[in-house]
Amino acid sequence: MLLLLAVACTDAKDPVPTPDPQADARARLAVLAQATADGSYDATYRFVQRPSNATGTIRIRQVPPEYRIDVTSKGTASFFALNRGVISCAVKGRATSCFLVARPGEEVPPLFDPGVQRLFRDAVEELARNPNDYRVTVVEATPSAPAGTTAPTGASGPSGASGPSGASGASGATGPVPSGTCFAVERVTTLAPSPGTSAAGFEDGTYCFAEQGVATRIEVESGVLELVALGGQPNSTWFFVPAKVQQLPALSPTPTPGRT
C-alpha cells in the first residue's frame, strides 16, 4: 500500500505557474534600465519640448558617474556633471564661458539646470532600483516596429551622414541606431516610495531601452527624446571643459519693498 502511494505521488505533475505579464515587464524594465544607468555611451537625441514645441538636439556622453550634456537649439549650452562638481558652459558668438554652478552634493541652481538629466539619469536609475513601484506594460506594436520596440535605423557615420531626424555625423556616430524595447510606465500612487529612495525627476510616460545600455526614446508630458545617432567607445577628451572655469558671481540680495 505504501509502495502504491509512493508511485502515485511520483506521477503527480507540479502545477504550471500562472503567467504574470506585469511581473515579467517590471523585471525586464529593471534589467534594461540598470544597463542604461551603468552604460558608457555617446548618444545624440532629437528633442521636442512641451508645451512650447521647441526643438533641437541633445548630445549625451556618459561614463558613470560622470556625464556631459550638449544642448543645441537656437544656441549651444553644455552641462558637465563631473566628480569635482557641476560646470555649465555657454557659447555666445566666438566666446565660451564656463561656471562652477554646484559643488559635489549641492543642488544645481534652476537657472543652470537643463532638466534633461532628470529623465536619462534620475528616472532611469529609479526604474532600475524600484520597478515594483510602477505599473509597467510593454507598448503595443507600431507599423515600423514589432510590439514594444523602437525601430533600428541605418548606419550614420562620422563623414556627416544624417540619422532619421537629420542628426549630423558630427556627433561621432559610427554605427546603426539600435532598436529598443518600450514600456508604458506609471507610478502606482497608492504605494509609499521604497525605503531610502525618491521618485524625484520621474514622469509617467514611455521609456525605451536598447540591449546595448542606452535609451532609444523617452516620451513624457514635458517632452520627447528620440535617439538619432550613437557614437563609438568612451573617450577621455569628452569631459575636457572648453574654457577656464569661473566661480559664479555673488548676487546682491533683492531689496525689500518699502525699505531704503
Image (cartoon, rainbow, N blue to C red):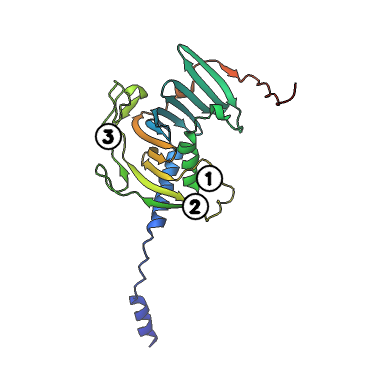
Q: CA distance from mark 2 to mark 1?
A: 9 Å
Circles 2 and 1 in contact, beta carbons < 8 Å: yes
Please state which amino acid type lies under the numbered disc 3.
Thr
Residue for badge 3? 153
Disc 3 on helix, strand or loop? Answer: loop
Residue for badge 1? 199
Residue for badge 2? 133
Is 155 left, or right, of 101 in this rendering?
left
Please state which amino acid type lies under the numbered disc 2.
Asp
Q: Nearer the viewer, residue 9 or 85?
A: 85
Q: Is residue 41 above or below residue 242?
A: below
Q: Which quadrant is the C terminus positioned in?
A: top right
How crowded is the residue under tag 1: few (<14 C-alpha within 10 Å), some, or many (20+)?
Answer: some
How crowded is the residue under tag 3: few (<14 C-alpha within 10 Å), some, or many (20+)?
Answer: some
Of callouts 2 and 3, which one flags the residue occurring earlier in the amino acid sequence?
2
How crowded is the residue under tag 2: few (<14 C-alpha within 10 Å), some, or many (20+)?
Answer: many
Q: Nearer the viewer, mark 3 or mark 1?
A: 1
Tell me which residue sits at (60%, 30%) in the image: 104
